[in-house]
Image (spheres, rainbow, N blue to C red):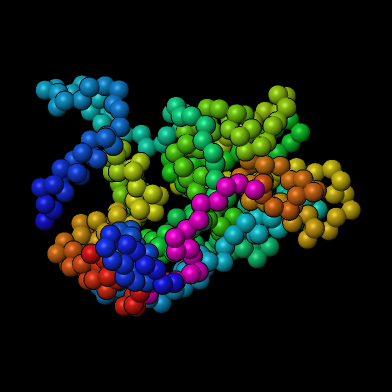
Amino acid sequence: MPSRSELDLLYQIGSQLAPAIHQAQNWPYDVPHAQYEASLWPPHDVGGQPDAPVRYEEKEEEQWELDTYVTCEVLGWKGVWNAEERRRRGNNDIGLSLYYDFPYYGRWVLCAARMLVDKNHVSLLELLEKIAEVKARYGKP
Amino acid sequence: MAQTHDHGDHSHPAAPMVEEISDFEILEIAVRELAIEKGLFTAEDHRKFTEWAEQIGPAGGSRLVAKAWTDPAFKARVLSDGVAACREIGIDWAEPTGQGTPSDYMELRVLEDTPTLHHVIVCTLCSCYPRPLLGHSPYWYRSPNYRRRLVRWPRQVLTEFGLVLPPEVEIRVEDSNQKCRFMVLPMRPAGTESWSEEQLAEIVTRDCMIGVALPRPDRKADDVRPVHKASRPVGGEHHEPGGSP
């Protein structure tokens, strides 16, 4: 359980991460049909969105990133999940804050963990215990 | 490396420098080990796929382009059926599972540049890339910035990569997707008329096949760009299931 001050910190950071929205969204009483459809099928491509020039740089790959790629692919190979579940739902349909705040493979590994629980391959408790066990194994507080 | 640090009135040796394992590393190990423990896949499956994933790279694409430059009949086959043409140079899109990877569907279209048309690829949805032929995509290719801007300001973005094209050259941006992968077949540069296939392949760099650079007789590597180093890069220290730090 996080402490009160830890929670405060999380909320403080989280409030700064929320992206700007272009239309006020505050639980409307009614939703026109077009908006209903649009809400169910949010666009996931970012082509044409405004952005400023940046310095394009090469990023050396972390071992965990390659391992994540392989784990997610092997789960697909063995039929544990399909592309729709992985890409559209798992990698993209996760809310903008998380989408932009995690590194590329961070999103992959998070959705793999969520999928194992969602599909009852492991219980949430098993996942949490495994994470705690791995943390302890590597001496992470 | 022995280190000391001060506590004002005294100092003592610090613990050995061990960079703390990250949350993502922990989650990755947890997911992999649970999947193996639950029988969703075996450690051998993971090893086999890793072996494949570690040997892919842009060299395959370079060979494809060099052969297409020197063999018009091969080029015609490249343009009509990219995946079949890849088999001729020893790249089988069916690897490593027999049915390809779950992500890289066995469909490749090669886009031929002409004196008046230049192609460049992007994936505005996520990060689709012809992995079996070019290896893993560079991080900037997956970045929201590249994906956002390339489709709207292609000429400007190419300039930022150091590629300035004359205004009479049309730029066509191909948006990759889940079911079809693209690669650029650049034009063979002047001054390479007597070159062998092997010599030609050396100047076809990854960036040339993405379309953010053009092959040049005097350049065998992509332009130097800043590199962000990994904390624990691929091939270094590896957290094996059940292993110790």
Q: Residue A108 location in percent, x, y?
A: 35, 54
**Residue shown at 70% from the left, 24% from the top:** B167
Range drawn in magenta: B224-240
**Residue shown at 58% from the left, 33% from the top:** B157
How many marks on residues? Answer: 0
**Residue shown at 16% from the left, 49% from the top:** A6
Q: Could you tell me if residue B121 is visible in this image?
A: yes
Q: Is A101 placed above or below A3 here?
A: above
Farthest-out residue, right: B194
Q: Residue B98 location in percent, x, y?
A: 49, 68
Q: Nearer the viewer, residue A111 or A130?
A: A130
Q: Is B184 placed above or below B24 here?
A: above
**Residue shown at 16% from the left, 25% from the top:** A26
Q: Is B38 placed above or below A95 here?
A: below
Q: Does the magenta segment cover residue B244?
A: no
Does the magenta stretch mainly form a helix, a strand or a loop? loop
